[in-house]
Image (cartoon, coloured by chain):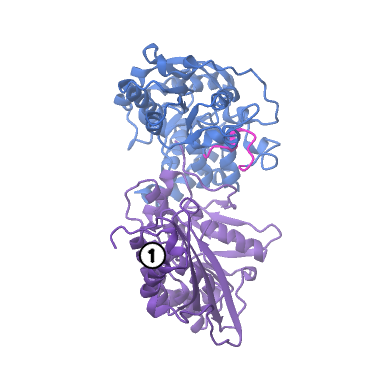
Amino acid sequence: MINTFRNHPDLKPLLQKINNNVVALDGKALPLKFMEVCGTHTVSILKFGFRQFFKDTIKFLSGPGCPVCVTSAKDIDKTIFLAQQGYHIVTFGDLIKVPGSQSSLEKEMAQGATVDVVYSPFDALAIAKNTTKEVIFIAVGFETTIPVIASLVLDAYAQKLNNLSILCLVKTMPNVLRYLLTHLQGQIDGFILPGHVSVIIGSEPYEFIPEEYHIPCTIAGFEPVDLGLGVESLIDQIRSGSVKVDNRYTRMVRTEGNTAAQVLISSVFQESDVSWRGFGIIPLSGLGLKAEFEQFDAEKKFDIRVDDVEVKTACICGDIISGKSSPLDCVLFRKQCAPENPVGPCMVSFEGACAAYYKYGE
Amino acid sequence: MDNKTILLSHGSGGKQSQELLELIYKTLEDIVVNHGEDSGTFKAQSGNIALTTDSYTIDPIFFPGGNIGKLAICGTLNDLAMVGAVPKYITLALMIEEGFNFDDLKKILLSVKDETKKAGVSIIAGDTKVVSKGKIDKIFINTAGYGIISSDQVISSKNAQPDDAVIVTGEIGDHGAAIMAYRNGFESSLRSDCANVAPLIKILLEKGAILHVLRDPTRGGLASILNEIASSSNVDIEIDEEALPLKESVTGVCDALGIDPLYMACEGRAVIVCPQDQIEQVLENLHEIPLGKKARCIGRVIRKSSHPTLYLKTFIGATRILPLLSREQTPRIC
């Protein structure tokens, strides 16, 4: 199954044809600029060699699709504040290494803070049942992860757990793309839309991109054949001048998405304005708990006091996730900033653009 | 021996110690030599000998395709083979946590016996310690190996030459992926590749193959070992993604966890660097033995280099660097 999409005999001819078609485009400055929104796409593009294969014809820009990378320093400071109060923090692995303004969860662990790294939000439930301490799950993620977090809240509600809460930092995709487009109009020739997020939300929420901004979009999977088909669609749309959201990941993504997951999300969460690293606050670009679940909201339950400290480093993670710069443009890259000593979140996360460039650089 | 556990007193040197030692000696009876002396003795050989030691700790100690006992024997025999030595003797030191199950120890010892016997090797010295609960994790094993080098070839990580071929003796990443799948509760048919590769090397040397480098890609996997060879020999190496022998199930587990199979440990494979004109003979000889059936040429040494680098030619024909990883691979979060 994997090899069908990874190393198919038609793949190389397809990519060669795409390259030829790009060169033959009329009146388009090369390289074309395509933004891959999702961090997993960034990894695929570098890992399978697309960046090098298309180096003269297509420039791939990383978008704001890595949940760790888009978390602001102030939000990281909130997790550190909670850890310092002696609460039991439960989080995904990558987050512990992200530097806040002064410290990181990893450093707090070395000072004795209780931080458990888990693979599933449900582990927080089990931890809360076995302790009398306040347990706080650090909820980061996009639409892909949010249904599981919603289930966690519903289970905690049903089981009347009063020592579990979540620090809700989850974000949603469509409005951050709108924000990017209003700030970067004319600079992006096509979007490779996130496959995993689209499984949940479907293709409809992206329709405004071709309609209002006339930019071609494709929903693609993560194997080389998936990516090749996605890129082919973008080139075809540019050639024909007829733009749309073209779903090339039909084995996973339906037009309407996963409606059961959508119902689950909207039963627990409501849209809210949230803060993004590099962008600031974007209206209705994230989710907060509905009033009936506010007992599980760590922000309401605890008096979280963090300052608005401006972190002064030469780190350009904010520019990288908005497609303005590449990791190679950063003066810290591979020098002061490396996976063993990350300055910014893009070097921490497996899906971060800097970590991917570091690991798969040519 | 129903659920009998090992107590601190089993390591005290007194009567109870006899019970533990009896289990060990009885199980290993026909492969232990010089039993009952403070040191093992053997007749010295003329020529070059190889000596190696390694300590083994693994979670879980029983895993699909093997256990810590099999690993401790194969790992050390493989290290001997990687300098072109034929293994002769091995030592066995057991560090056992108080409360460890007698039956589990017996299972481990039976694997030790199987592998040692198959390899035609004797256990020449040993030691057993029991330590208080919590001081170690279940059982640690240290083995040392002694082997004889009869070929006068220079086989060394420093000896990779431009245009040499890079061969791997079987599918890669099985051990690491099997352990990861097991630890993460995946249902899979994956098994560790844990095996003694010394017979493969022995036959190559007997048939007169010219070999420049031999390494076993254990911790850090194929990519890390090839980086080490590149750096020791001051050469650039390129491997071809299309040629890599990789099980789809290994790729699947690694993709799900966000880790790279090229960095996953193998415990029963060897990387061979040899002149191009040896490829045919080497592969033919390897293919004759079941353990070497999937051996393949996966790349070549491309040039001398002052910045030794390992390159991967990807499925689509692009080239990228395969660096040494700076952190241990951790499973993905989303």
What is the crowding at mark 1: few (fewer than 14 residues within 10 Å), some, or many (at least 20)? many
The residue at the point 38 percent across, 72 percent down is B22
Which one of the lettered chains is coloured blue?
A
Q: Nearer the viewer, residue A64 or A348?
A: A348
The residue at the point 61 percent across, 86 percent down is B47
Amino acid marked by disc 1: Ile
Q: Is residue B309 above or below residue B84?
A: above
Q: Chain of mark 1?
A: B
- The residue most toward the top is A291
Q: Position of residue A34 (x, y in %)?
A: 53, 33
Q: Quadrant of the N terminus of chain B?
A: bottom left
Looking at the rendering, the stretch of residues picked out in magenta corresponds to A339-350
Q: Secondary structure at mark 1?
A: helix
Q: Nearer the viewer, residue B32 or A123?
A: B32
Q: Nearer the viewer, residue B36 or A42?
A: B36
Magenta-colored segment: predominant secondary structure: loop
Q: Is residue A341 above or below residue B126?
A: above
The residue identified by callout 1 is B108
Q: Nearer the viewer, residue A129 or B234?
A: A129
Which one of the lettered chains is coloured purple?
B
